[in-house]
Image (tube, helix red, strand yellow):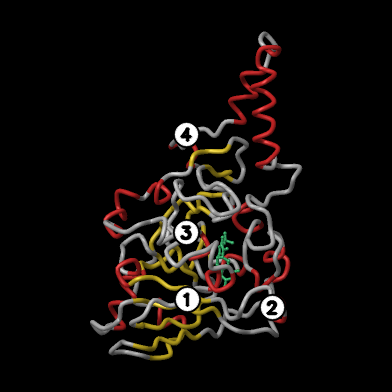
Amino acid sequence: MLIKKPDDIRSSEITPERDYVDRRKFLALAGVAAVGVAGTSRLLSVLRPAPAQPGDDKPNTWEEITNYNNYYEFGTDKDDPAANSQHFRTRPWTVRVDGLVKKPADYHFEDLVKPYKVQDRTYRFRCVEAWSMVIPWNGIPLAEMIQRFEPLPSAKYVRFETIYAPDQMPGQKGNVLPWPYVEGLRMDEAMHPLTLMVTGLYGKTLPNQDGAPLRLIVPWKYGFKGIKAITKISFVDKQPRNTWNIAAPDEYGFYANVNPEVDHPRWTQASERRIGQFRRIKTLMFNGYADQVAHLYAGMDLRKNF
Ligand code: MTE
C-alpha cells in the first residue's frame, strides 16, 4: 500500500488513473471530431465509473480471492501470499485473550471456535488501494466470541495481533512494516453483528494466503482492518495504534471507514475497480453498509477520523 500504486493491478489489465483522466480529457476535446465514430460513446461509458449496482455484487471466484492478496508477511506482490504461504503452520494454534476481561486465557483454536455455528456471509470487500471484491466468507460473529470472554466495562477497544514467526514468514525478516501486524476496533464496532471472525471461504477451510486459521473482517471498513493469522486479542481502555497508521499516519487512520467523500492523499476513493470486471464502479458510503453502521459515527467528523 505504501509501496504499490493504488489499484495495484498489472498495467496490462487496467488503465492507470492518470492516463484514464487524461484520456477522458482527450476524448472530451476530441469529442466533436469523434461524432459519428462508431464505438466512441461505448468507450466513454466504459471509462466513466458505473454506479454500483446489485449486478456488480456477483461473488468473486475462488481463484481471484486466493491469488490476489495483501499479506506483507509473505511478500508485497499480490501473488506472493499464494506462492509463499503454503507451508505456514496453522496447527497447533493458540489465541491469547488478555487485558480487561473476566476470562483471560490461552485458547486452542479448536476450543475457541467449537461452541459456535459457523455462518455464511457474503460481503463486499473494499481495499484502501481502490480495488474490491465480493467474498463468500464463513465465520463467527466476533460479538459472540467476545461475550464469552466477559469484557469489563472499562474495556473500550479491542486490539488484535498477528503471529510473529519470522522463520515461517519471510516478510517479517525485513522491515517493510513494523511487526507483528496489529489492528484495533472500538468496542461497539467489535460487537456489531456484521463484524466477523473468519475461518473459511466458499465453505472450505480458510487458505493460508487469506489469513488462516483466523482473520477479522469488518465489511464497512477498508480491507487493512482485516488482520490475518490472529494470535492475540486484548481488551484495552485506550485507542490502540494499528500497523498502517504507525507506518503512514497521514495516509491511514484508525477508523478506516470506506468513504467515497474522503480521498486518500494520493488517490481518489470515489470509485473502485472490482476485480474481474472492466468498468470502475462508484464506491458506496460505508461500502454499502451505511444503513447498518452509520449510527456508530453520528456526530463524528469523518474527515478528521479517517
Ligand atoms: N494482515 C496481516 N497480518 N498482514 C497484512 O499484510 N494486509 C491487510 C489485511 N490484513 C495484511 C493483513 C490488507 S492491506 C488487506 S487489503 C487485506 O488483509 C487483504 O485481505 P485478502 O488478501 O484476503 O483480500
- Amino acid type of the residue that numbered disc 4 sits on in the rendered structure: Pro
Q: Position of residue 170 (x, y in %)?
A: 72, 77
* Residue lying furthest right: 12
115 and 270: which one is in front?
270
Q: Nearer the viewer, mark 3 or mark 4?
A: 4
Cα separation, mark 1 vs mark 4, equals: 34 Å
* Amino acid type indicated by mark 3: Trp
Q: Which residue is mark 1?
A: 241
For label 1, being within 8 Å of ligand 1 is answered no
Q: Indicate which disc, 3 or 2, sits on the residue closer to the N terminus.
A: 3
Disc with the residue nearer the chain's start (2 vs 1): 2
3 vs 2, front mark: 2
Ligand 1 location (quadrant): bottom right
For residue 43, side relative to residue 264 (left or right): right
**Which label was assigned to residue 175?**
2
Of residues 190 and 90, which is closer to you in this image? 190
Q: Kindly indicate the quadrant of the structure image that contains residue 228.
A: bottom right
* Mark closest to the chain's N terminus, 4 or 2: 4
Q: Which residue is mark 3?
A: 137
Side (left or right) of 81 relative to 12: left
Q: From mark 4 to mark 2, how far is it between C-alphas? A: 40 Å
**Coordinates of residue 232 in the picture (x, y in percent):** 47, 83
Q: Which residue is mark 4?
A: 51
Of labels 1 and 3, the one closer to you: 1
Q: Cα distance, mark 3 to mark 4? A: 25 Å
